[in-house]
Amino acid sequence: MQISETPIPGLLVLNIPVHGDNRGWFMENWQRQKMVAAGLPDFGPVQHNVSYNTSAGATRGIHAEPWDKLVSVIAGRVFSAWVDLREGDSFGATFTIEIEPGVAVFVPRGVANSYQTLEDKTAYSYLVNAHWSADAEYTNVNLTDETIAIDWPLPMAEVSDKDKAHPRLGDVVPVPPRRSVILGADGQLGRALRALLPDAIALTRADLDLTDPAAYDSVPWDDVDTIYNAAAYTAVDAAETPDGRRAAWAVNVTAVATMARIATEHGLTLVNVSSDYVFDGTAESHTTDEALSPLGVYGQTKAAGEAVTSTVPRHYIVRTSWVIGDGGNFVSTMQRLARDGVSPTVVDDQHGRLTTAAELAAGIVDLVRTGAPYGIHHVTGGGPVKTWADIAREVFEAEGRDAADVTGVSTKVYGEGKQLAPRPRHSALD
């Protein structure tokens, strides 16, 4: 099996072995394992359609359906033509080829498909990754458009009135790319992601109740390619209370299960952000393959969310640590205390690295855009490992205060008389 590229990006020609003998022939017209290994996208077909054409010259198209498809011929022979109707530099690019058994073509969403039968009794096959719907919107271009100038080999026969009425290329509205969805778009990370993904569907807590599965039905998932889950219950101490425990599980696990189901059903990429709290902090630096060992409820829910996310074929679990961004955070609190003349007591036996929301968002988007391997990734700020007290002293010095105004204290002493959740002693992610 061989796969070759064409002048239209993403449009691929497959040469499939045909095995013949005195009885006829046999071929594996769809063989996921072999085809994906050869370079075909794992596009997840869900419906198989066959178009039977009685006479040579029957001409159909040119249609850009809102799904990917693998087209081939079961019997007979066709002249096929494609026109790129996607938004971008390749808009209007064309490609033609004759297809017979043993040749198939992968057609990405937004590339318009057409064919003309070259023999009587031709059966044309479409393997598609979305169920046909009467409500689906198609983008079309006219079969005889002078701009694309397709040289049809036979006089056109049996062209439908609908196909005859398709617009010229100059009147076609290009098919836009699929969009991303950002959940938790009003949080620190969500706002940083919105800055990098201005065309994304940004949903805040006011827009969508993450804990209501029915609420997700309002999102046009067929037009989406990636879900960025920047939403989370992060009140670590409150998660140890009865109400907080239920809220943490609802947002960090049950809602993620809904996202995972949607991503799997629609073939989407799911990005779920996790935490150093999935570890107990006994190791000084945590690797991506370290066994999970959360200490408290928050860490337990993030670990469970990771397990749910891992069931999605296309997923990224992005662990990070000590995130600060636009809004209230440890650094801004220390700045305020320094300016107000306060001399705080800060924990000096918890170790980790600060991560700005901006650099976390940039790392996440880079993973997706570069097609990094699916699975677990660590994205944090760089530099040496520090304690919270170290960071507080740096903030005080930057504000013109004496670093000695910050007093270091152990976690045990700091927690006396307080209801605090257990925290990992070491939070650095390798």
Image: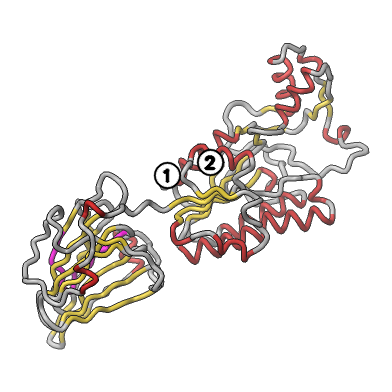
Residue where numbered disc 1 is placed? 369
Task: Look at 80% across and 14% down and name the residue there.
Answer: 404
Q: Looking at the figure, which quarter contains the C terminus?
A: top right
The answer to which of 363 and 131 lies nearer the viewer is: 131
What's drawn in magenta, residue-wise? 96-108
Q: Quadrant for the N terminus, please.
A: bottom left
Number of marks: 2
Residue nearer the viewer, 124 or 371: 124
For numbered disc 1, what is the local secondary structure? helix
Image: 157 above or below 230: below
Q: Answer with mark 1 or mark 2, whichever residue precedes in sequence.
A: 2
Q: Is residue 257 left or right of residue 87?
A: right
Q: Secondary structure at mark 2?
A: helix
**Left or right: 288 in relation to 365:** right
Residue 235's spot in the image, x, y percent? 76, 45
Residue position for label 2: 194
Residue located farthest toward the left when viewing the structure as drawn? 154
Q: Quadrant of residue 152?
A: bottom left
Q: Nearer the viewer, residue 422 or 177?
A: 177
Q: Is residue 101 magenta?
A: yes
Answer with the quarter of the image where residue 391 lies. Answer: top right
Residue at the spot 22% in from the left edge and 69% down from the top edge: 163
310 over 114 or under it: above or below: above
Does the image show residue 16?
no
